[in-house]
Image (tube, rainbow, N blue to C red):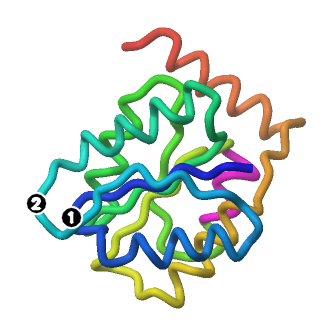
Amino acid sequence: MKIAVACDHGGFPLKEMVLETVRAAGFEPIDLGTDGPESVDYPDYAQKIGETINSGTAPKGILICGSGAGANIAANKIKGIYASVCHDVYSAHQAVEHDDMNVLCLGARIVGPELAKEIVQAFIKAEYWNAGNYKRRVDKVHAIEAIGK
């Protein structure tokens, strides 16, 4: 499985470690940039993640900025993208299992590399529990998205 990875300048210090963690877990990372510490705009990278997922190239993505918040807000504006900031292991897998999250947002200024590795592993290995209460609730989220208001 391919995993899209993108970051702004605030997330750049964590990006290489995230790419390596994805590889070490047996997945293929797609590096969407940024490629250096120069200032860039996080919405541009959220859009790259969204386009990659919505095209079917990768089912999941990891988006990194300084806090994770800006990336999260921008990503959730894209139809078909269900992003969340997760700075703990439980939320990283639970949001996939229960809520069908497809984009993990991390704050490189919030979590250290060792915790980030565990969070990334939990996210990429988790699968959506597409049944019962979980499916009903996610279907309601999709219905809200379809209204667009």
Q: Are marks 2 and 1 in contact (CB under 8 Å)?
A: yes
Q: Identify which amino acid the numbered label 1 is placed on.
A: His
Mark 2 closeness class: few <14, some 14–19, many ≥20 residues within 10 Å: few
Q: Position of residue 146 (x, y in %)?
A: 52, 12
Residue picked out by circle 2: 39
In which image quadrant can residue 119 be found? bottom right
Left or right for 41, reference 58: left
- Judging depth in this view, the residue of 60 and 37 nearest the camera is 37
Mark 1 closeness class: few <14, some 14–19, many ≥20 residues within 10 Å: many
Compared with 124, 139 (above or below) is above
Span highlighted in magenta in the image: 92-99
Compared with 47, 95 (above or below) is below
Assign the magenta stretch its main secondary structure: helix
Q: Position of residue 142 (x, y in %)?
A: 60, 22
Taking the spot 35% from the left edge, 42% from the top edge, the residue there is: 46
Taking the spot 76% from the left edge, 52% from the top edge, the residue there is: 97
Residue 45 part of the magenta segment: no
Residue picked out by circle 1: 9
Total numbered badges shown on the rendered structure: 2
Left or right for 145, reference 70: right
* Residue reaching furthest to the top: 147
Q: Identify which amino acid the numbered label 2 is placed on.
A: Ser
Q: How far is disc 2 from disc 1 in space, using C-alphas? A: 5 Å
- Judging depth in this view, the residue of 6 and 116 nearest the camera is 6
Callout 2 secondary element: loop
